[in-house]
Amino acid sequence: MSQFIESIKIEDQELFLLEYHQKRVDQTFTHFGKEGSIDLEKIFKKLEHDEDGLYKFKIIYDLDKRVRTQMIPYAIPEILDFQLVENNSFDYSFKFEDRKELEKMKMKSRAGEIIIVKNNHITDTSFSNLLFLKGKDWYTPKTYLLNGVQRQYLLKKKKIKEADITLQNIKEYSHFQLINAMNDFDDMFIYSIDKINNLPEKSIYKN
């Protein structure tokens, strides 16, 4: 049976974006025709986690409501470079625990992290959604693989906008940053677009 995963930010014993995580879990059960769900807050409270600091709270579950948990101290990863990787068939619309295809793409690349391209459109990295800077505004690709909780939250708060970001127009953006449940919007922690080591030449692609 398929297993799914939620990774929740815990800082000083506080759960972040819990409403968004719970909604995604509930939608997963509904999509696969299962009644009920699991209660993430109850699972957290049973752990009696009383440590301050930043943690990743991982909940691995299946549709029979079997649950495993991990509480892992967290530090934001430092990534030196990125590579565009094309995969037109990859689907990650639900947060499956199985990441073999993602790891395979990463292993074939020649960079610290990959940016997955699907039908000429920019999607996500192997572990996060993306934001791109144009002028003073931040944009996230409409063509995400997984509609992450941080992405949903920032769109709702109108801190970011959606855009069609493609191989043809990616050079119109000057910088980018990675967001997920653990990595908040932070315009001090950004990468120059030149950190992508295989940016396309415009002449290669037809509009």
Image: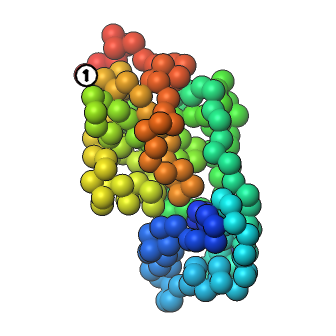
In the picture, measured across the screen, residue 140 lies left or right of residue 108, that is: left
Residue 193 seen anywhere in this rendered image of the structure: yes
**SS under mark 1:** loop
Tell me the residue at 42%/17% (across/down): 200
Which one is nearer the viewer's eye here, 19 or 99?
19
Tell me the residue at 70%/86% (across/down): 46
Q: Position of residue 120 (x, y in %)?
A: 38, 31
**Which residue is labeled 1 in the image?**
207
In the picture, measured across the screen, residue 24 lies left or right of residue 81, that is: left
Which residue sits furthest top? 203
Q: Position of residue 23 (x, y in %)?
A: 44, 74
Which one is nearer the viewer's eye here, 13 or 140?
13
Position of 77 relative to 207 (above/below): below
Tell me the residue at 44%/57% (across/down): 150
Q: Amino acid at mark 1?
A: Asn
Position of 7 relative to 108 (above/below): below
Position of the N terminus by quadrant: bottom right
Residue 168 seen anywhere in this rendered image of the structure: no
Tell me the residue at 29%/19% (across/down): 206
Q: Position of residue 154 (x, y in %)?
A: 36, 55
The number of discs equals 1
Q: Position of residue 109 (x, y in %)?
A: 64, 28
Q: How is the image coloured?
A: rainbow
Position of the C terminus by quadrant: top left
Mark 1 crowdedness (10 Å alpha carbons): few <14, some 14-19, many ≥20? few
Position of 35 relative to 180 (above/below): below
